[in-house]
Image: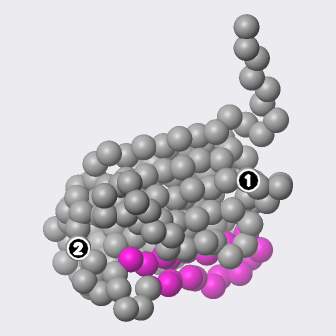
Amino acid sequence: MLAAGADIWAGTDQEKLAYQEIPGGRDFTMTALLRDTTIKHNNAKVGIEFRSSIDGTLANNYLYTLAYSVGLRKIVVSGGDFTDGSAVNLTEPYAGETGVVLPIWFKWEVKTVNGTRTATGYTSNDGVTWTERYIVPKPIPHTAKVYVGVNVCSHDVLGGSIFRDLTLEVAPPQGTVLFLR
């Protein structure tokens, strides 16, 4: 996947996102393996994300990215919930974890428990044993649609990233009754 956009936080998104649309209210788990990247910019981020809109703005939307920070060689979480009109961005690097090397697995798990929709981000070196990296601090709104996918934010430096083994598991809509014969 090639990218050359400025950033996610500019007036309009300029990241590259290969995504799948999921009807709102459904729980899902997405995993992807980031094999390699040729992007060299210190602020570049490559990973997976979910968001409520792909219209290119963050106003009245939410966005959460779990990514490899190329320059920092750390795992970071970027994003936030802007559905209440706030414009505060979240960027959360994990101190003390410099030297993260590729390949690395990413996973977002969004699930509803007792009526509250939560999201947890994980990473793994082998795709089997997962380390919890981030729990989104507020409930995830039940929007009409959710977009999930792999993203590359290169900060205007053309470069590519190689993803493999993408999986997306989507739960049936809440209240779905399955019948057996």
Asked if residue 167 lies left or right of residue 61, the reply is left
Q: Position of residue 60 (x, y in %)?
A: 70, 68
Q: Residue at x 62, y 63 (%)?
A: 119
Residue 112 tag number: 1
Q: Secondary structure at mark 1?
A: strand
Above or below residue 172? Residue 26 is: below
Identify the image quadrant of residue 86.
bottom right
Asked if residue 148 is among those painted magenta in the image, a careful observer would answer no
Q: Which residue is mark 2?
A: 101
Q: Nearer the viewer, residue 53 or 72?
A: 72
Q: Is residue 111 left or right of residue 158?
A: right
Quadrant in which the C terminus is drawn: top right
Q: CA distance from mark 2 to mark 1?
A: 33 Å
Q: Which residues are drawn in magenta?
A: 75-93
Mark number, residue 148 = none
Which corner quadrant holds the N terminus?
bottom left
Point out residue 67 in the picture as x, y percentages from the top left corner: 40, 70
